[in-house]
Image (spheres, coloured by chain):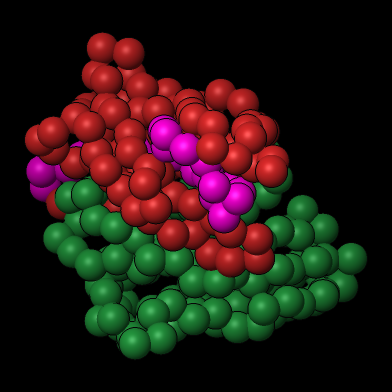
Chain colours: A green, B red
């Protein structure tokens, strides 16, 4: 199993540009999440999904969109990038039943720089 | 709302010395607690977790943590540091949900960078 994969590894954008961060998992996990990591702030939840077709907002959702058409994929879209979105983005997945004790498996991250 | 505080953004120890990374949490319900490790330019990897049962939890690479409800703490320890332990460590809390509504959403502390000197 490849686990959780993310592409690209690194991206530079100009303010106002759009892009999609890709995330895929091959563990048949129901739950997938996107976090952003900023120095001194740990990781913060952006959006999460509890299954194909079901998504919800996390702690810092503004400026980001998600969709989940398949169990395997959970892309994160930046519609109009801003310098405040410069960060490292991690995708994670976990199995059910969603009572909180599950281990989350993280991808290697995407480093995004918005100029 | 739940929160996590890691005391000390940087901890430096000598090889062979005790490692102690501090984590305190606040939660309105019994929490699930996690420690993750992040090596440079990599994702996060689970070290250990507390869900129920024994309050002293053993994890990978010789690390362990003790859940102390009265102190709302979940400190991470390792008796003897190794150079390979140098990394950033994150404490996280997940809200326990009998109805299955927490979905493993984690609240992280700000992280502690561990440096190990020869």
B96 sits to left or right of B19:
left
Name of the residue lying farthest toward the top: B70
Q: Is residue A13 magenta-colored?
A: no
Q: Quadrant of the N terminus of chain B?
A: top left
Asked whether the viewer can see residue A63, the reply is: no
Q: Which residues are magenta?
A: B77-99
Query: Would residue B74 appear left or right of B7 to someone viewing this image?
Result: left
Residue A25 rendering spot, x and y as whole percentages: 38, 81
Q: Residue at x 11, y 47 (%)?
A: B99
Q: Position of residue B110 (x, y in %)?
A: 58, 37
Residue drawn at point x = 31 percent, y = 48 percent: B59
Relative to A32, say whether A74 is above or below.
Answer: below
Camera sees residue B68? yes
Q: Which quadrant: the C terminus of chain B?
A: top right
Q: Residue B33 in the image: state x and y as whole percent.
A: 31, 38
> In front: A15, or A35?
A35
A72, B53: nearer the viewer: B53
Indicate yes or no whether the magenta region holds residue B91. yes
Quadrant in which residue A39 is drawn:
top right
Q: Nearer the viewer, residue B12 or A84?
A: B12
Q: Quadrant of residue A17?
A: bottom right
**Left or right of B61: which side holds A89?**
right
Corner quadrant of residue A13: bottom right
Check the image and report above or below for A81 versus A36. below
The reply, left or right, for residue B102 in relation to residue B2 is left
Residue at point 44%, 83% (across, down): A24
């Amino acid at each position: 199993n490849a686990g959780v994969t993310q592409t690209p590894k690194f991206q530079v954008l100009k303010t106002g540009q759009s892009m999609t961060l890709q995330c895929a998992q091959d563990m048949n996990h129901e739950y997938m999440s996107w976090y952003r990591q900023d120095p001194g702030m740990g990781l913060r939840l952006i959006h999460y999904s509890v299954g194909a077709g079901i998504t919800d907002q996390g702690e810092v959702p503004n400026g980001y969109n998600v969709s989940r058409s398949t169990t395997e994929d959970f892309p994160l879209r930046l519609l109009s990038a801003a310098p405040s979105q410069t960060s490292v983005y991690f995708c994670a997945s976990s199995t059910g039943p969603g009572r909180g004790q599950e281990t989350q498996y993280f991808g290697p991250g995407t480093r995004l720089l918005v100029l | 709302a739940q929160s996590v505080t890691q005391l000390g953004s940087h901890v430096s120890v000598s090889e062979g010395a005790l490692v102690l990374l501090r984590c305190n949490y606040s939660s309105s319900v019994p929490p699930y607690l996690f420690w993750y490790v992040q090596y440079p330019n990599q994702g996060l990897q689970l070290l250990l977790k507390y869900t129920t049962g024994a309050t002293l939890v053993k994890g990978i690479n010789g690390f362990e943590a003790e859940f102390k409800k009265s102190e709302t703490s979940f400190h991470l320890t390792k008796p003897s540091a190794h150079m390979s332990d140098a990394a950033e460590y994150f404490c996280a809390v997940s809200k326990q949900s009998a109805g299955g509504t927490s979905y493993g959403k984690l609240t992280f502390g700000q992280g502690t960078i561990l440096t190990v000197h020869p």
